[in-house]
């Protein structure tokens, strides 16, 4: 069964360091999402891609976060510099959604748990 | 503004039935999703409603009333493995944020023997 892949699964870093997370969506899925989930909260969208284009990055703290999906397949989310408040689970999801009315669910990867010391 | 409310925690007994409620106030609406999330794991899809009424899928059912901004997830014949957080999410209508899900904080369900 096709799955969304993410790496690393766990990352511990010190504040002010740079970190990067990688996501490989389900093959053929046009839309890719990065979410941040703080313990005890629901996921919050950081950025949405359709193919290689950013559709929504309104909630992405652009002073320190960046995301790219250069070839419209896999994606990287970077934080530089990391702050204590960035400690969270970073989830990647993909969907075949192409802006049509459909029940296209989002399929989530296992996530990367980031701890900033 | 966007607001999705669900109870923080619930407890139920193995074999019983539990209903988890969700109310929402969002600028747009293009469907409501329920996800299950075990501790430390990714959310997994349970159900989807876009029209009013009940959708049944095995032990799980989900109901939607768009006029009331209300949904519930019904879990029957509870099993210990159903202990998890249940996330209610509303898909925003399209515009610049096509297909975006707005999640509630989740309801942590504990199933006891």
Image: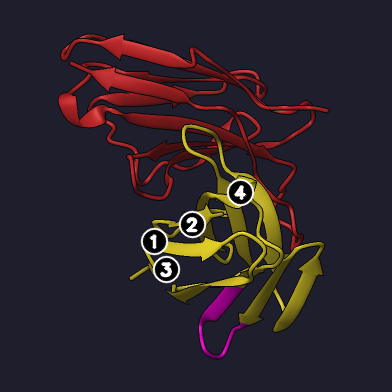
Chain A is which colour?
red
Above or below B18: residue A45: above
Give the crowd class for mark 3: few <14, some 14-19, many >=20 residues within 10 Å: many
Sequence order check, earlier mark of 4 and 2: 4
Q: Which residue is mark 1?
A: B9
Above or below B90: residue A115: above
Above or below B70: residue B58: above
Q: Which residue is mark 4?
A: B80
Give the crowd class for mark 1: few <14, some 14-19, many >=20 residues within 10 Å: few
Sequence order check, earlier mark of 4 and 1: 1
Label disc, if present, on residue B6 of the rendered structure: 3
Above or below A86: residue B8: below
Residue B105 among those drawn in magenta: no
Percent position (x, y) of residue A51?
66, 32
Residue B71 among those drawn in magenta: yes
Residue A65 shows in the view: yes
Quadrant of image for the C terminus of chain B: bottom right
Q: How is the image coloured?
A: by chain
* In front of the other: B37 or A14: B37
Real-space Cα distance between discs 4 and 2? 10 Å
* In front of the other: A45 or A72: A45
User: Residue A82 appears in which quarter of the rendering?
Assistant: top left
Chain hosting mark 2: B
Q: Which residue is mark 2?
A: B109
Give the crowd class for mark 2: few <14, some 14-19, many >=20 residues within 10 Å: some
Read off the magenta span.
B65-72
Q: Residue at x 37, y 13 (%)?
A: A11
Real-space Cα distance between discs 4 and 3? 21 Å
């Amino acid at each position: 069964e096709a799955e969304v892949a993410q790496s690393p699964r766990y990352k511990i870093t010190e504040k002010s360091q740079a970190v990067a997370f990688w996501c490989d969506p389900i093959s053929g899925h046009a839309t890719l999402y990065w979410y941040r989930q703080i313990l005890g909260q629901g996921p919050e969208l950081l950025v949405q891609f359709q193919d290689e284009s950013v559709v929504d990055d309104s909630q992405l703290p652009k002073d320190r976060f960046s995301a790219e999906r250069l070839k419209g397949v896999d994606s990287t989310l970077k934080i530089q510099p990391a702050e204590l408040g960035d400690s969270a689970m970073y989830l990647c999801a993909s969907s075949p959604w192409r802006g049509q009315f459909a029940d296209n669910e989002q399929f989530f990867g296992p996530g990367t748990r980031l701890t900033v010391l | 503004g966007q607001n999705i409310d669900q109870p923080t925690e619930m407890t139920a007994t193995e074999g019983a039935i539990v209903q988890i409620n969700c109310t929402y106030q969002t600028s747009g609406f293009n469907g409501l999703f329920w996800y299950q999330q075990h501790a430390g794991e990714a959310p997994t899809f349970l159900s989807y409603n876009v029209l009013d009424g009940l959708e049944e899928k095995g032990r799980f059912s989900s109901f939607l009333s768009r006029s009331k901004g209300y949904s519930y997830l019904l879990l029957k014949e509870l099993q210990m493995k159903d202990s998890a957080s249940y996330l209610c999410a509303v898909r925003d209508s399209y515009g610049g944020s096509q297909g975006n899900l707005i999640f509630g904080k989740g309801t942590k369900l504990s199933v006891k023997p």
